[in-house]
Structure formats: C-alpha cells, structure tokens
Image: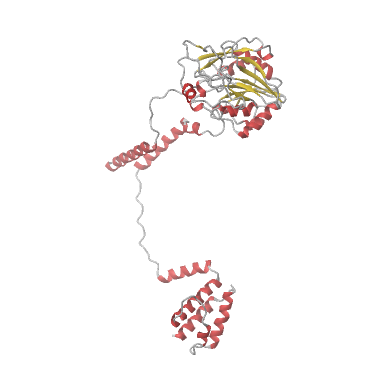
Amino acid sequence: MKERLITLALAIAAFAAFYALMGPKPGGPQERPPTRPTSIEQGPNGYLGLMRWLTAEHVPMLSLRERYTKLSELPGLEAESGNLMLTTAPQLYPLRHTEVGPLRSWVIQGNTLLIVAGLSDTPDWSMGEGIDPDFIENMQAMTDLHFQQPPPTPAQPEAKTEGAAAPAPETAPPPDPKNPKAPEPTMRDAMQAAIKYDQPVRFEMKPAGPHPLLEGVATVGALSEYPSAKWRAWMDGQGEAVVELAHDPVSGVPVLWVVPSGRGQIILSAYGSIFTNKALGNDDNARLLANIVRWSVHDKGKFIIDDAHQGLVAFYDPTAFFGDRRLHVTLWWLLGLWLVFVLSSQRLRPALSKWSPVDITGFVRATGGFMARVLRPAIVGQQLFANFFNDARIRMGLPPNGEPVWDWLSGQSAVAPEDVQRLQDLHAKVQHGRRVDLLRLHNLLVRVRTALT
C-alpha cells in the first residue's frame, strides 16, 4: 500500500510539473471579447434578431459556413440567381485571392451581394483580433471600387453620442490628387483609433434622392465604439456607374452605394453596424433591409448570411477545436486512465536470457554472406588481385598501388607457368567487368602464394 501511495504522489507531481511547463499561463483580468456578427449570435453585434424577423416573414434563409469557392456547390441553393448574401467587413477570416473569382461570377449570374463594412464606423468587433490589415484591398477586390479619405472640411461638427459626448476623430490629411490611394495613417491616427469611447458614437445616413431601396427611409443610424474616418468610393472609367444612394448629413460624404455587376449588383454600406441586433430596431434600419430583400430576393432565391468569414465555419478551425469542451473532457479521461494504469498492480518483466556470444566463424560467415549479396563478382575479383599484387610489390620494395607484376611473377621458378597464364586470363576478365568463379580464383591465388613462400 505504501508503494502505491508513493507512486500516486510521484504521478501527480509529474503531471503538475508537465502542466506548469507546457500548460497555458493564466493572465491578468481580461475584458470579455465583443460578440461577432453571425446568424446565431444574440449579443449586440449579432444577426439573430435579423434571422428571426425574416424567418417570421417567410423569407428563405441560409447560413454560409464555407469559403466563396463553394458558392456554386452550396446545398439548399437551388436557384442560380435571385439570391441575396449579407457579408460583414472587416472579416475575421479575410478574403483569399482564390475567392474573388467565384464571388464575382456568382454576382454576375444575377445575385446581390450586400456588404456592410466598417468604413465610416468602427464597431468593437472590428478591433483587436478582428483587425484586417488588408481591409481596403479586400474591399476593392470584392467591389472593384477604389477608396480614399476626403480632405477635411473647415469646420466639422462633432458626431452625436448615446448618453455622453465624445470627441470627433481627427481627419487624415488630404490625399495627393496624383495618387488615388488612401493616405497612410499617422501614429496619432493609430493611437486615437485604439481609444474606445465611453459611450458608442452615433452616425446617420440620409437619402441622397429617391430610389426603390430608400422607399420610406428617412434616417438610418449606426453605432461606433471607436473613432472612425470617412471614405469616398469611385470606379475606374471602364466599369459600370456607381450610384450614391445616401450620405452622412454631418460630413456630406456618401455612405451607401449600388454597383451594377452583370445581371446582379453589389450594395455597399460604409456603416457596418446598421443591421446588428443593437441597431436593427433603430430609425429606419429595418425598413432599409426590407427594401433590399424585396428588391433582391425573387423566384426561388434565398437570403444568405456569410457566417464563415466571421468565424462560424464548417471547415477545420484550430481555435474552435482547442476550445471545444469535448476535447478537454477527453483529456481528463485520458489522465484518469493513466493514473489507474500507474496505480494498478503490474507484473515484473521476465528476466532476460543469458548473453550468448557469436563465434568468429559465424561472424565471418555472416560478413561474407553480406558482401556476397551486395558486391559484384568482378569487383571482388579486382580486389583479390590488388591484394595479391600489393603483397608482391611490398616484397620487391615497390609502392603498393595494386599494379600487376607479371614479369616478376613469370620469373619465379616456384610458380608453374600454367598458373601464371591462368591468373592473367582471370585478371583480364575482372578488369573488363566479366563474371569469374571467385572460389577458383581464391584457390589459385592461395596456391601461388604458397609456392612463393
């Protein structure tokens, strides 16, 4: 019993040492990560309210949990056109180059891509691990639009806040007219963008004119937890015309666009929070979404929510795998079974048999058999001749380089001329790589060596 208690204590100590070295180290108190815009999220940034509302209105719904390369193979998507897909940016799993082609082809077939992007607002889920360093480049790839920050206005009023005033972010310097790219953010911009507001800042969009998408829409509200900048969008002359539907009433910068693409279209909102649970019921946000659905979903089309790029995926996700409770339960079971095995009675290993040395004859036989299997007879014959001639050359005081000494050998009266001739014939064969009888050659060399001694 005492031995088992000692074994248990040592096993627990070994596990504790392993966990201390390899296990995750507890950090300080961390703020709970913000919820993400997915179809099953009931938090403030989720789309569960949108899903329940449209389901109650009998709008066919579908959750996309694969990359855009699987759009044409999506189960439950019978119609090739008349579908509407809502995707939110920045994306937790950013757009890949291989996805751009399938996505654009899907839109051209007659479908609608609705992008709600945190361009002119900065929701909390777009910061931290949600930051996409290639956000603007990915937006350009999806929409074929170019984006830049407009020059600052002389006097720009502060944005409205919910419950408390918050300073308006400093606008970036005006872009170079010869360089249409967005200006590089300064260190001050980066520091300001990292400071979260005490209360979310409220932004608005107002219709720029009559349009079917804006029927009954007077104001659409957005909420931003971090400072944000305004962006303009345009398309090169080769593409379709971009329709600016709504603008920010404070800065006058457009924040809602429609981009025709083949038989389909792309609807882009510069506010990424307008359809989330916390904002859908405010102002005319729900009216705008209803107009988009009525305008885009027809025939057998469906409303698709892009969950995959926000972390809700059907393919392998290492973060979800290691965070799965079932994995932790399995590891605890394995630990328990290991402790049972360690503490259970185990039979001692049987004594090893006495050492039996191999005799020299067996060693030579095994070595010779190995050489015979891996060396060609001609090579073995060449080495036998080289050893024989080296012995003769050492006796003559010559360097042992393996060169034949036929004249010297022919002058030895103790060696029969027939044996010398037979050696010359066998030497010629092995030099040309021909097969010889090694046993016969060995016996002949032994006979000649004996005669020379």
Which quarter of the figure has residue 428? bottom right
Q: Where is residue 417 in the image (x, y as percent from the top left)?
A: 54, 88
Instruction: Using the image, determine if residue 293 lies above or below residue 182.
Output: above
In the image, taking residue 332 as reference, residue 210 lies left or right, namely right
**Quadrant assignment for the N terminus:** top left
415 or 157, nearer to the observer: 157
Which quarter of the figure has residue 344? top left
Instruction: Using the image, determine if residue 3 lies above or below residue 98.
Output: below
Count of numbered circles in the view: 0
158 or 39, nearer to the observer: 158
In the image, taking residue 211 as reference, residue 130 lies left or right, namely left
331 or 323, nearer to the observer: 323
Q: Where is residue 173 in the image (x, y as percent from the top left)?
A: 54, 22
Instruction: Using the image, determine if residue 278 lies above or below residue 421.
Output: above
Instruction: Using the image, determine if residue 216 lies above or below residue 224.
Output: above
In the image, taking residue 128 as reference, residue 216 lies left or right, namely right
User: Please, which residue is most extreme toward the left here?
Assistant: 2
**Quadrant assignment for the C terminus:** bottom left
In the image, taking residue 26 as reference, residue 153 lies left or right, namely right
Protein image colouring: secondary structure
Which quarter of the figure has residue 106? top right
Q: Where is residue 19 in the image (x, y as percent from the top left)?
A: 37, 36
